[in-house]
Amino acid sequence: MKLLVIGATGPTGLQIVAQALEQGHQVTAFARDPAKLKISNPALDVAQGSLPEDVQALAAALRGKDAVLSSLGLRNALRANGLQERSMQALVPTMQAAGVRRLITVSANGVGDSHAASPLLPRIMYRLLLGDIFADKKAGEDVVRASSLDWTFAYPTLLTDGPRTGKYRIGERLELSGMPKISRADVADFVLKQLQERAWSKKRPVISY
């Protein structure tokens, strides 16, 4: 498939790009700083740009694509400044104009309704440290849900740099305890499987070990 990966230079985005290339997909990485994408592969193109500002570059990168995979996020920040909401407000109409319907987004456990089902310690962390970030993620998801796109929002628990195992739990409600975790590599594994599987279309599955 021909894929556009947004947030491609982040730690989860790099896993998505690498695994997509391993699986034989043609990948275009949409990146503010292409130098951070230290992957050399003839099936990889890089489109320089960032959301929500570079809508023209985004439109060009979307041409001919089958799906968009987004792991857009902020590193080491506690204030979102509306990044997700503003980015989805730019992405959704641009995808619709390009005729690209499939959008798979890496969100986070603790966003929206998943907050109440999280264990006590993560709930405290979400409230004290990530309240603004998660509210912005929810606002961005609301933009997507109001559209005609075929979306899936993946809600991973605490992310690690562990290996891809292919052995993880998926569900709209999971029994979780302590500080549940999952590797970025396994999140990427799940995201790419959604290109063929339809069970989680227009749903928000939690992913964890």
Image (cartoon, grey):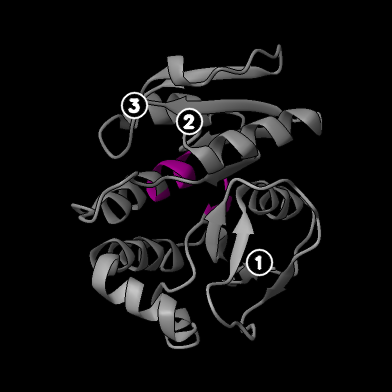
Q: In which quadrant of the rendered view does residue 142 lie? A: bottom left
Which numbered mark, 1 or 3, is in the foreground of this view? 1
Q: CA distance from mark 2 to mark 3?
A: 20 Å
What segment is highlighted magenta in the picture?
A: 92-105
Q: Secondary structure at mark 3?
A: helix
Q: Secondary structure at mark 2?
A: loop
* Residue 108 place in picture, x, y as percent: 47, 64
Q: Residue at x 57, y 33 (%)?
A: 14
Specify whether 122 is left or right of 83: right
Q: Which mark is residue 121?
A: none
* Residue 172 place in picture, x, y as percent: 62, 80
Q: Which residue is mark 1?
A: 201
Q: Residue at x 54, y 79 (%)?
A: 178
Q: Secondary structure at mark 1?
A: loop
Graded by Cα atoms within 10 Å as few (under 14), some (14 to 19) or many (20 or more), the crowding at tag 3 reads few
Q: Residue at x 50, y 87 (%)?
A: 117
In this view, 20 is above or below 168: above
Q: Quadrant of the N terminus?
A: top right
Please tell me which of labels 1 and 3 falls first in the chain.
Answer: 3
Q: Which residue is mark 3?
A: 56
Q: CA distance from mark 1 to mark 3?
A: 28 Å
Graded by Cα atoms within 10 Å as few (under 14), some (14 to 19) or many (20 or more), the crowding at tag 1 reads some
Say which of 164 and 170 sits in front. 164
Q: What is the three-letter code of the residue carrying label 1?
A: Ser
Q: What is the three-letter code of the residue carrying label 2?
A: Thr
In this view, 155 is above or below 88: below
Please tell me which of labels 2 and 3 falls first in the chain.
Answer: 2
In this view, 147 is above or below 161: below
Q: Which residue is mark 2?
A: 9
Q: Is residue 99 visible?
A: no
